[in-house]
Amino acid sequence: MRTTTKKSLALSLAVVMTGSLVAGCTGKDAAPAQSAEGSKTPTKPITLTYWTDLTSNAAASVTSLGQVEMYKELEKRTGVKVNFKHPVAGQVAEQFGLLVASNDLTDVIEYGWVNYPGGPNKAIEDGIIIKLNDLIDKHAPNLKKILDSHPEVKKQISTDNGNIYAFPSLNIQKNRVFGGIMVRKDWLDELGLAQPETIDDWEKVLKAFKEKKGATTPFTLTKGHIGGIPGFLEAFGVNNDFYVDNGVVKYGPYEPAYQQFLTLFSKWYKEGLIDKDFATNDTKAFDSKVTTEKAGAFPGYIGSSMGKFIPALKGKSERQPGDGPVPGSRQGQYTQVYSTRLGV
């Protein structure tokens, strides 16, 4: 049986090393974790094992997340090496079942624990994962501060009896840290336009891309983005799912503001500012429109989008996408909502 000293270390680092829901599992004995007061590099080499799905976007470029530059840099900064174990593509649930049945568990498992038979509390009772309350109190002061100041977030990662079972992916600030609406910064510079911040700003930019840059699809996307265009929907103060607003549970698509969002995008669609082929765009078509100058803005992520398009555009003049801030309303105001969907 592996001791909690390794678990403590693994879990303390996991909150820094991933932006998704992760839970610590049993592990071999290792050096104790650093205290909350410090984040010094360990004096002895430490290796953690991490089980997680390798998404199709990542699989197109690497065979392991360990090959991603971000994780290489994290290893340099922390002195902690992470050995990733990825289930066979398309067999995540089956491979997870085999992992649990074998009891040969990794130090960290990234999984949708609400899908575990009996729920996350049963996973704790079965010894598959451990509750994180005490570990967060001792080793994750920044996360603890957030959970203490945002009880609604803490509730979403806790069982009914108060056991915290996973580290969450959080988006409670004005700017997204993992992705959003990306825009061709070189086009902005060429046209003398500032970084768009409000809905009106974006309308001006998209029109300029169409009229002055000849972009046939100024803003491209796929049907998978339609439920709530990352970034734009928040400008209307709603979500495309259930969320909590001042203690009241609301459903975004039922709110009047959601209709305002749809009305705006209907207008942009008719004006040719939005890709009229969004419903049939697959990944190949989407990527092509970004790299062939047909689109100047698009929803994307730092890794799977920016990490792919910057190398693809390198050397072709000064083309480079930049990540824009979450748009505000027409007056520049901003409203953030919390989603109750915490799937991995």
Image (cartoon, helix red, strand yellow):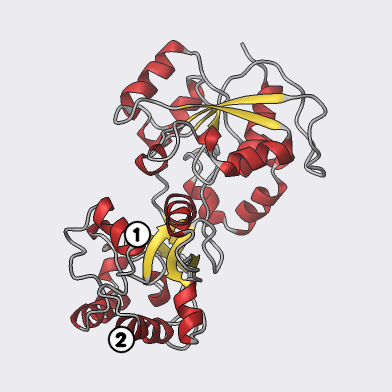
Q: Mark 1 — residue?
A: 242
Query: What x and y, as percent, mark residue 33?
Result: 75, 31
Query: What x and y, as percent, mark residue 192?
Result: 50, 87
Element type at mark 2: helix
**Where 12 sits versus 217, above or below?**
above
Residue neighbourhood size for the residue with mark 2, other residues' Cα within 10 Å, grouped as few (<14), some (14–19), many (≥20)? few
Amino acid type at image mark 2: Glu
Residue at 22% across, 84% down? 271
**Where 270 sits versus 136, above or below?**
below
Residue 239, by quadrant, is: bottom left
Instruction: Name the residue nearer the viewer: 133 or 22.
Output: 22
Instruction: Name the residue nearer the viewer: 119 or 162.
Output: 119
Q: CA distance from mark 2 to mark 1?
A: 38 Å
Element type at mark 1: strand
The C terminus: image quadrant: top left
Sequence-wise, the earlier of marks 2 and 1 is 2
Query: What x and y, as percent, mark residue 182?
Result: 44, 66
- Horizontal relation, residue 52 to residue 74: left or right: left
Q: Please state the total of marks drawn on the protein image.
A: 2
Amino acid type at image mark 1: Phe
Kindly report which numbered mark, 2 or 1, lies closer to the viewer in this rendering.
2
Residue 72 is at least partly visible in this image: yes
Residue at 30% across, 76% down? 215
Q: Mark 2 — residue?
A: 211
